Amino acid sequence: MLSRKVPLDTAPALVAPTYASRGMAHTIPRFELPEESMEPRAAYQLIHDELALDANPSLNLATFVTTYMDDEAARLMAETANKNAIDWDEYPQTVGLQDRCVNMLSRLFGADERHDSVGTATVGSSEAIHLAGLAMKFRWRNARRAAGLPCDRPNIVMGGNVQVCWEKFARYFDVEPRYVALTPTRFIIGVDEAMALVDENTIGVVGILGSTYTGEYEPIAALDAALTALCEKNGGDWDVPLHVDAASGGFVAPFLSPELLWDFRLPRVRSINVSGHKYGLVYPGVGWVLWRESSDLPSELIFEVDYLGGSHANFGLNFSRGAAQIVAQYYNLIRLGRQGYTEIMVTLAETARWLATELALLDGLEIVAGGTDLPVVCARLADDVPFSVFDLADRLRLRGWVVPAYRMAAEAQAVAVLRIVVREGLSRDMAECFVADVVGAIDHLGTSPPTAPVAADPCNPAAANPRSAAAASQLAGVARVPGTKHVTEVKEIVDSKTKAVC
Ligand SMILES: Cc1ncc(COP(=O)(O)O)c(C=O)c1O
C-alpha cells in the first residue's frame, strides 16, 4: 500500500486513552515523530485499542491468507521473530529448515528423483511470480541470443483473470502482457485462445491453479499438451514453458485431487509458485517458487553473497526478511503431514460445498463457483433482484462479516459476484450463522430496497460506487483496466482486482 505525506495543518492530534493513568493522558502527534518517549504499556494500549477498529480476522471471508495457527506455531514464530533469514552463517539451522521445505514441496509438486529441482522462500506469491517471470525472460533471451535472433520484444500469455502481481511483473520488467479475453460465461483462460497469442517471443504461458476470482482451476494439462503441439508444429522452435501460479491451489490439489495433473509431472511445467500463507496455513508472509530443474533458472540471476560470512547463492527481490514464517511453514509440514493437510482440505471443501448448496436455495442467488476446485464459493444475483451484490456485502458487514463484492475482470465485467473463501476457522457452525445472516440481509434488502442500489457501471464503476472508488484510490497503481496505462488513471477503476485481492 502506498502511503502519502499528510499536511500537518489538516492532521488531528492523536489523543491517548486515559485509563486512570498519567502516562496515558497526554496527546501525541499522528503524523510526526513524537518528541518524548512513552511507557511501553501506554504505547501498547494505544495501538491495541486503535486496531480494534479493524475487522475481525475470523469473520474475514475475503482473504485467502491464514488467520489461524496452532499456539505452538505462534510460539515458534515469536521465538524466531528476531532472526533474519538472510543471515545464513549465523542461523544455519533456519537455512536448513528452508532447504527441507523446498525439498518437500518440490516432491509434493511431482518432481521426481531425476530432477535437480531448486527453489526459494519468498515473501509471498507475488515475489515468487516476479522471480519465476524473470527466469522465463532470461531463459528466453539467452536462447534467442544464442540463435542470433532479436530479443527486444518479449511477451507473456495469461488469462484476463490473473492476479494483479502478473500485471506488475509485466510492467516492472518490460514484458508485453498478452491477456486471453474472458467471456460472460468463461472466467478463466481458454486453451485455443491462449495458443493464438503465443509466438516466438513468448517467454512463457501462465496457468492458474485456483483463479483469484472464482477459485476455478485452469486447464493446465490441456495448456501443456497444446504448447507441445504448437512447438512441434513450428519445427521444435517454440519451446515455450508453462508456469503454474498455484498460489492457493498448490496446497489444495495435492491433497484433494492427487490424480489431477497440473505440476512437474507435466513436461512443460518448468516453475511453480505457491503461497505458504494461503492454504499452506502459515501467517503472512511466506511464499515459495520452485523450478523443476536447476537449468530452468538462468545462473546470471543468482547472486553469490559472501559478506555475511561464507558464500551463499541468493535469488530474491528482498535481502533481509523474517525467518519466522519459514520456521512456521516447516512446523506445519511436519506437524500436519499429508494426513493433516488432507483432513483440513477435505473439511474445507465440504464446508464450501455445503455453503454453495445452501446459498443456491435462496431466492435471487445464483452460484457461479461452488467449491469444486478451491474451497471458494462465488455467487451472483439474478437480474431482477432490486439490490446489488455490493449492497449485500455492505449489509453483511453490519454483522461483522467481510465478504468482497466485485466485478469479474475485463470482458466479463458485466458479472458482479460475492466471494466467500472458506479457510480454517470457518466451522460448519459458523457457516450456518453466515447463511442465516445472508437470509436476513436478503430479506431486509428485499423489503427495503436501497433507493440507489450500488450497481457499479462496468465502464466506470468507481463513479457509481464511492466505496469502491475509495478502495481504488487506496490501491492506486496496482489495478489494471483495459486501455489504462498510468497510475494516475487508476482512480477511475474499480477493477475487481481491488476488491478481490488478498
Ligand atoms: C492466483 C494468485 N496469484 C498470486 C497471488 C498473490 O499472492 P500473494 O498475496 O502471496 O503475493 C494471489 C493472491 O491472492 C492469487 O490468488
Image (cartoon, rainbow, N blue to C red):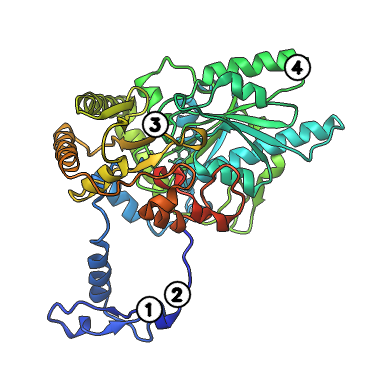
Labels 2 and 1: the sequence-earlier one: 2
Which-is-in-front pick, marks 4 and 1?
A: 1
Give the quarter of the image for residue 223. Answer: top right
Q: Secondary structure at mark 2?
A: loop
| Residue at numbered disc 4 | 236
Q: Amino acid at mark 1?
A: Ala
Taking the image as drawn, is residue 71 in sight?
no
Q: Separation of disc 2 and disc 3 at Cα?
A: 38 Å
Q: Is residue 365 left or right of residue 492?
A: left
Q: Is residue 192 left or right of residue 140?
A: left
Q: Amino acid at mark 2?
A: Val
Residue 214: assigned label: 3
Q: Amino acid at mark 3?
A: Thr
In the rendered view, tell whether residue 181 sits above or below residue 227. below
Out of 412 and 264, give the one closest to the viewer. 412
- Mark 1, Cα crowd under 10 Å, few <14 / some 14-19 / many 20+, is few
Is there a contact, CB below 8 Å, between mark 2 and mark 1? yes
Q: Separation of disc 4 and disc 1 at Cα?
A: 63 Å
The residue at 45%/74% (across/down) is: 6
Quadrant in which the C terminus is drawn: top left
In the rendered view, tell whether residue 340 sits above or below residue 18. above
Labels 4 and 1: the sequence-earlier one: 1
| Residue at numbered disc 2 | 6
> CB of residue at label 1: within 8 Å of ligand 1?
no
Q: Amino acid at mark 4?
A: Gly
Q: Separation of disc 3 and disc 4 at Cα?
A: 35 Å
The residue at 72%/37% (across/down) is: 154
Taking the image as drawn, is residue 155 in sight?
yes
Residue 190 in percent (x, y) is at 54, 22
Residue 107: assigned label: none
